Image (cartoon, grey):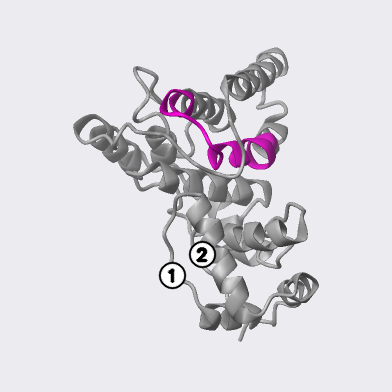
Amino acid sequence: MADPNARLAALMDEGGFSHKSLARAVVGAAARSGVDITCDHTYVSRWLKGAIPRGDMPRFIADAIGSKLGRRLTIDDIGMGDAAVSAVQPDLGLDFADRPEAVTTTVADLWRADLAEAEPLVRALPDSAAWNEASVRWLVSPPDGELTRSGNRAVGAVDVEMVRSTADAFSMLDGKFGGGHARRALIQYLQTDVRPMLDGTYSDGVGKQLHSAVAEALMLADGCRMTAACMALPSAISSRRCA
């Protein structure tokens, strides 16, 4: 049986949340990210008992509580970080995602697992079959190209340029010193600074440029270790490809 989630309980108490009011707040946080979810007080009871919800639910919980408390919370703050990493499977990122939201979730999970040096990924061998399948699906049946999003922060061309400039700086370091120099710092930047951008508010044009910039950063960081996720990011972005 999982250990009770004391961090989540403490934050709920600080924010004056009941089980039902937190469930409503989580639904609202998901809606602000353009995601429709089901959540009620029984879900909250399971989380307090130590259950870790799948997908983006931990992030929605953190966003919901953080909005009430007036500060940004991470899934570590709500007591779900370590458990989320321990639940990582070696096939994470090998399936071609056909929705931008799914791609964002996958790469964020990979960034977190990478920083934590999650054993399933550290020991995993490259899967050429997954790369071939992702390539074919990208060419034959690419996802819908619409990348307009409505999230918690506005993202514009300046933000996209910042991502590109930062990736260029890391590329210069790698070219000068080799050996994936400063790679971990790049992954940390993507997880801490870029992930909130992907969940922000932007037009289709800015969204395409943003996803393109992130895809290029992924190639620099991992040599496309993220296979299908790397392929899906630029799937609706003109001629920029992860191949």
Q: For the residue marked with disc 1, what is the amino acid?
A: Thr
The answer to whether the residues at label 2 and label 1 have Cβ atoms under 8 Å apart is yes
Identify the magenta region.
Answer: 189-208
- Callout 1 crowding tier (Cα within 10 Å): few <14, some 14–19, many ≥20: few
Question: Looking at this view, is 213 or 86 the one in front?
Answer: 213
Q: Where residue 41 sits in the image (x, y, percent)?
A: 55, 81
Residue 38 has which mark? 1
Q: Which residue is mark 2?
A: 27
Instruction: Describe the element under mark 2 as helix, strand or loop.
Output: helix
Specify whether 222 is left or right of 81: left
Question: Looking at this view, is 195 or 90 the one in front?
Answer: 195
Q: Can the viewer see residue 185 in this picture?
A: yes
Q: For the residue marked with disc 2, what is the amino acid?
A: Val
Question: Looking at this view, is 178 or 57 the one in front?
Answer: 57
The residue located at (63%, 67%) in the rendering is: 83
Q: CA distance from mark 2 to mark 1?
A: 7 Å
Specify whether 55 is left or right of 97: right
